[in-house]
Image (cartoon, rainbow, N blue to C red):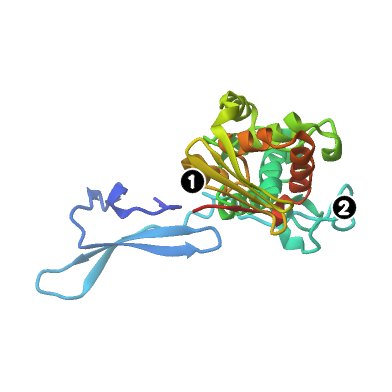
Amino acid sequence: MAVTLLRPSVASLQLPVVHGRMVTRPSRLSLVPYDLSLGSFRLVIHRSRPGDHSAETVYAAPPDTGAMVRAKVPARRKDGRPGPPDRYPKDPDKYADPRNWKYPVHTPFHARAARRYFNDPRNREKYDEAEQAYVDRKIDEALAKFGVAAKVLGGVEEPEAGIIDEDVPGGKPIEEMDLDALLAVLLGTDRLARAKEIPEDAVQFTKRGSTIVNADVKSYTVSLDLMNKTIYHDCTDWTQNRAKAKLFCKHVGRFFLSMKPGEATNTLRGLLLERDKWVFDVA
């Protein structure tokens, strides 16, 4: 019997049968690293003899080499890019498929896009199982780094609260998108609708300069610093969820809806084109 654990919890283990009997009341359970690159462990059970400070190993699970697929870097392909796309990172480590310069994961925006595209069976089938494991791991590491939750099992994503399904502009270039389309990218359909439900008089601008715009939205503060590419806000949805993923909450959406349309549109276009350079600040 082999026991391989990915987030080991000794208390939850079902003890194995050794020599026909269930091992009970072991003095010590150990989770011995087996393959650190995969995060797997072996279960080892020790039992102390009465009056003896030494410990007898009564069970040591053999490593189950077939339990997990060992990830490998995808091979170079005919349809792979010859180099990084224009205006994209030159470091291959910023790509989930580094040899083919595919699935960039250098920003929350791109990491989410990489997850959605790689979940498509037509894209996954281009890679063998070990290569899929590598691409999945790189994407998931990026999502975790940026604080974007995404549970993946067999290439299928379980949608998490606060993560919009479609966050990559489609149909039109960003430069041609109007205010509603730009806000839909950053808010999603439901939050955009809720932003529009906030009354106009709930927004009070406290500063309107050429580089800094501040406002109170209901009982919260929104501050836009164009020079330092920073948006500050303090509602719970923003601080606990949206800011980490560089997405808007309804209050920030209402803030931009209350700005002059041309000013808001130009700002949002610039933000989307350089989202990785913007700071979504919290209290």
Q: Left or right: where does residue 202 sit relative to residue 109?
A: left
Q: Residue at x 46, y 42 (%)?
A: 236
| Helix, strand or loop status at disc 1 | helix
Q: Left or right: where does residue 266 sit relative to residue 36?
A: right
Neighbourhood count class around disc 2 (C-alpha, 10 Å): few under 14, some 14–19, many 20 upward: some
Residue 134: x and y in percent read 66, 53
Q: Is residue 165 above or below residue 97?
A: above
State whether residue 267 appears in this view: yes
Q: Mark 1 to mark 2: distance in Å?
A: 37 Å
Q: Nearer the viewer, residue 177 or 138?
A: 177
Q: Left or right: where does residue 215 sit relative to residue 3?
A: right
Residue 247: x and y in percent read 62, 42
The answer to whether mark 1 and mark 2 are in CB contact below 8 A is no
Residue 217: x and y in percent read 54, 37
| Residue 175 figure quarter | top right
The amino acid type, in three-letter code, at marker 2 is Arg
Q: Residue at x 73, y 29 (%)?
A: 180
Q: Nearer the viewer, residue 40 or 144?
A: 144
| Helix, strand or loop status at disc 2 | loop
Q: Residue at x 83, y 30 (%)?
A: 171
The answer to which of marks 1 and 2 sits earlier in the sequence is 2
Q: Is residue 216 above or below residue 195?
A: below
Q: Residue at x 56, y 43 (%)?
A: 242
- Seen from this angle, which residue lies furthest bottom? 53
The residue where tag 2 is placed is 81
State whether residue 120 appears in this view: no
Residue 268: x and y in percent read 74, 42
Neighbourhood count class around disc 1 (C-alpha, 10 Å): few under 14, some 14–19, many 20 upward: some
Front disc: 1 or 2: 1
The amino acid type, in three-letter code, at marker 1 is Gln
Which disc is residue 256 wearing?
none
The residue where tag 1 is placed is 240
